[in-house]
Amino acid sequence: MAPEADTERDRLALITETIAAHRTGDSDRAVFETDTRRLEYADRTITLSVGDGERERLDAVLSSFPVFKIEQPATRKAPTGTVHVAAIADPKHSADFIERVFREVYQHETGYELRADRA
């Protein structure tokens, strides 16, 4: 069973630990998901799916994280709604960004449950 967390503090710790383990070569990618949403972290890239309103909210979150940038070539070649974000940051900053995506882009409630796994 994949580890899970339902408080912001525990989710941030879970995301940070999962990304750090992934970076040690433990896995090809880290997967973060709720009952309704999923995003992947692989090779310092976060891949997520967004709809029209969500894309605008993602742009707003990105404005708070200047080191995170949309990878234009990869995103243009991806299926509609799929966005690749370059995450050239330490695991903690990546965790902060991922938490904000689930809370602000996907509009999950404060106590949402997040599962993390490495594949």
Image (spheres, helix red, strand yellow):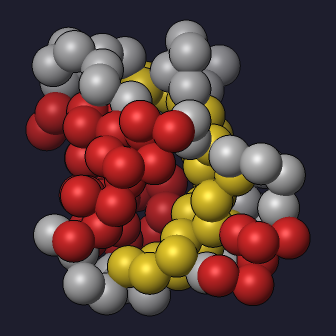
Residue 105 image-quadrant placement = top left
Regarding residue 6, the answer to whether it shows in the image is yes
Q: Position of residue 27 (x, y in %)?
A: 75, 63
Above or below 55: residue 20: below
Q: Nearer the viewer, residue 63 or 17?
A: 63
For the N terminus, the quadrant is top right
Residue 116 image-quadrant placement = top right
Task: Write the residue at 31% across / 87% down.
Answer: 67
Q: Nearer the viewer, residue 108 or 70?
A: 70
Task: Write the residue at 86% across / 70% down.
Answer: 77
Above or below 99: residue 28: below
Q: Position of residue 50 (x, y in %)?
A: 56, 41
Give the left or right position of residue 37, taking residue 78 as reference: left
Residue 103 image-quadrant placement = top left
Task: Write the residue at 49% across / 63% down.
Answer: 19
Above or below 73: residue 34: above
Q: Position of residue 72 (x, y in %)?
A: 65, 82
Q: Position of residue 3 (x, y in %)?
A: 50, 28
